[in-house]
Image (tube, rainbow, N blue to C red):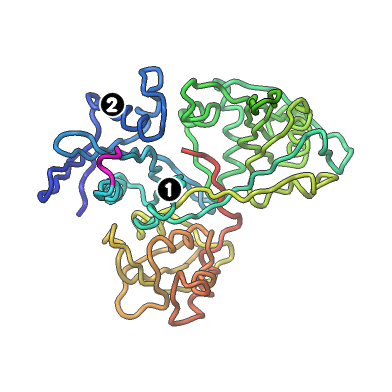
């Protein structure tokens, strides 16, 4: 059942109601979130910038708020296309209302809302993967945490890069927005950021209550034009019974060319007062290949965002086919009880570099659930690997191989923005 976001849904068998959160209920929402996530419950702890950044929904039990979530209206780049995406965040339920299925009701309702709002995709970040997979989201990206001591790392090349670095403030965000878009638009998983997102979630950490600015440094080429930048912040950590330790965290390093990459790396390594640098980078980051002692860098794979197909037909209409994808089609049966409009057999066709999904009759070449198919959709999971591992079944192995070629992406999905 599709429910427009401005309408409430009432479950007749229980005294519960789901509806958008009103201004009058923002205090209750703040308490619910702060209580659930051990946050600051005072007025100073309210994240008012977040409250105004998306659609907030709550489930009420006998008129009392029991659970809530928020949907950020975002756009994500996948293989050259900017696709509307509902970013799910702030999912919480008071402990006395848990084990009643309330979060599941909210998630299913959010799917109808996102579909109504024209968001064919949804993503979220969570440590509770099994919960969200139950409702159709799937782990669909990785990042790598690179950790090293700056005094132990040196670039292999002694050639000094052409250009210079300088720091900017959040009001100067346009200086790097074009650099970011040129880098991210043909990649996979990066958000198509607007001004507000730059200021609230890049130059600052979105859930940082004191709203401290990150440091942002730009690399300008020999002509003085920005060709890269780095977003980072420092922190002093106090171990028990030991002196404090300065740490530096790199949240994003974007470089369009060799000079920018080399220049920004040298800029970073010049921060050698820090005892350790932690860089949250891509899984294909070339860092370890361009330094003299790669074994001095520790690497840890991190789970990124989970992805969901909200509206399968529109999601495929928005996503280009793989580079040099063959003309052709495969059929796949999708199980999706939480979004029944996605349920059934679909014909996925590649033609002229575009993809299309249409409902089909008869037996399907492949079958899977909507969660696994989301990871195939953005190139995180190859359909042949899905069938090999039991995440999908194939009546025709050639169809899985064709799906590999049609759904491939040039870059692995990267979780660029936490929300």
Count of residue discs: 2
Q: Is residue 19 magenta?
A: no
Dot 1: element: strand
The image shows residue 218, relative to residue 3, as above or below, that is above
Question: Quadrant of residue 166 in the image?
Answer: top right
Q: Which residue is mark 2?
A: 26
Q: Marks 2/1: CA distance?
A: 24 Å
Q: Quadrant of residue 79?
A: bottom right
Q: Which residues are magenta?
A: 94-98
Return the x and y of residue 235 as percentages of the image width and height.
63, 26
Mark in front: 2 vs 1: 2
**Residue displayed at 35% across by 68% down:** 334
Give the camera-side residue of 283 and 327.
Answer: 283
Q: Secondary structure at mark 2?
A: helix
Q: Residue at x 57, y 40 (%)?
A: 181
Q: Residue furthest top?
A: 44
Q: Quadrant of the N terminus?
A: bottom left
Q: Residue furthest right?
A: 158
Above or below for 21 versus 365: above
- Picture coordinates of residue 152, whole percent (x, y): 82, 37
Cβ atoms at labels 2 and 1 below 8 Å apart = no
Q: 10 Å neighbourhood of mark 2: few (<14), some, or many (≥20)?
A: some
Residue ID at (74%, 39%):
148
Counting from the top left corner in percent of width and height, residue 338 is at 29, 58
Residue at the farthest front position: 241
Q: Between residues 26 and 31, which one lies in front from this camera angle?
A: 31
**Residue at 35% in and 47% down:** 119
Residue 376 in the figure: left or right of residue 169: left
Q: Which residue is mark 1?
A: 123
């Amino acid at each position: 059942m599709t429910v427009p976001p401005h309408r409430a849904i009432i479950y007749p068998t229980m005294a519960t109601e789901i509806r958008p959160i009103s201004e009058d209920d923002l205090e209750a929402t703040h308490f619910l979130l702060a209580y659930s996530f051990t946050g600051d419950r005072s007025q100073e702890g309210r994240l008012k910038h977040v409250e105004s950044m998306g659609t907030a929904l709550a489930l009420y039990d006998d008129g009392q708020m029991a659970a809530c979530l928020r949907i950020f209206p975002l756009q994500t780049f996948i293989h050259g296309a900017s696709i509307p995406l509902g970013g799910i965040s702030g999912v919480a339920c008071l402990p006395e209302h848990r084990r009643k299925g309330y979060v599941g009701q909210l998630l299913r309702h959010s799917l109808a809302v996102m579909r109504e709002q024209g968001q064919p995709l949804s993503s979220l970040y969570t440590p509770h993967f099994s919960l969200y997979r139950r409702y159709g989201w799937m782990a669909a990206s990785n990042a790598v945490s690179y950790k090293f001591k700056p005094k132990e790392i040196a670039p292999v090349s002694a050639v000094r890069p052409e250009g210079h670095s300088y720091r900017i403030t959040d009001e100067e965000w346009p200086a790097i927005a074009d650099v970011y878009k040129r880098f991210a638009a043909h990649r996979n998983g990066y958000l198509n950021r607007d001004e507000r997102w730059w200021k609230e979630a890049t130059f600052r950490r979105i859930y940082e209550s004191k709203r401290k600015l990150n440091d942002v440094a730009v690399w300008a080429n020999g002509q003085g034009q920005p060709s890269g930048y780095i977003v980072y912040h420092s922190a002093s950590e106090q171990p028990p019974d030991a002196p404090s330790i300065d740490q530096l965290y790199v949240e994003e390093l974007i470089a369009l060319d060799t000079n920018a990459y080399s220049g920004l790396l040298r800029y970073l390594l010049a921060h050698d007062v820090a005892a350790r640098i932690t860089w949250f980078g891509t899984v294909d980051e070339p860092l370890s290949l361009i330094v003299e002692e790669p074994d001095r860098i520790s690497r840890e794979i991190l789970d990124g965002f989970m992805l969901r197909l909200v509206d399968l037909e529109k999601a495929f209409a928005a996503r280009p086919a793989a580079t040099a994808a063959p003309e052709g089609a495969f059929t796949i049966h999708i199980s999706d009880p939480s979004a029944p409009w996605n349920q059934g057999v679909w014909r996925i066709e590649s033609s002229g570099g575009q993809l299309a999904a249409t409902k089909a009759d008869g037996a399907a070449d492949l079958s899977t659930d909507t969660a696994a198919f989301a990871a195939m959709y953005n190139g995180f999971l190859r359909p042949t690997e899905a069938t090999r591992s039991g995440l999908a079944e194939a009546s025709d192995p050639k169809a899985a191989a064709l799906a590999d070629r049609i759904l491939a992406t040039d870059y692995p999905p990267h979780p660029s923005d936490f929300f």
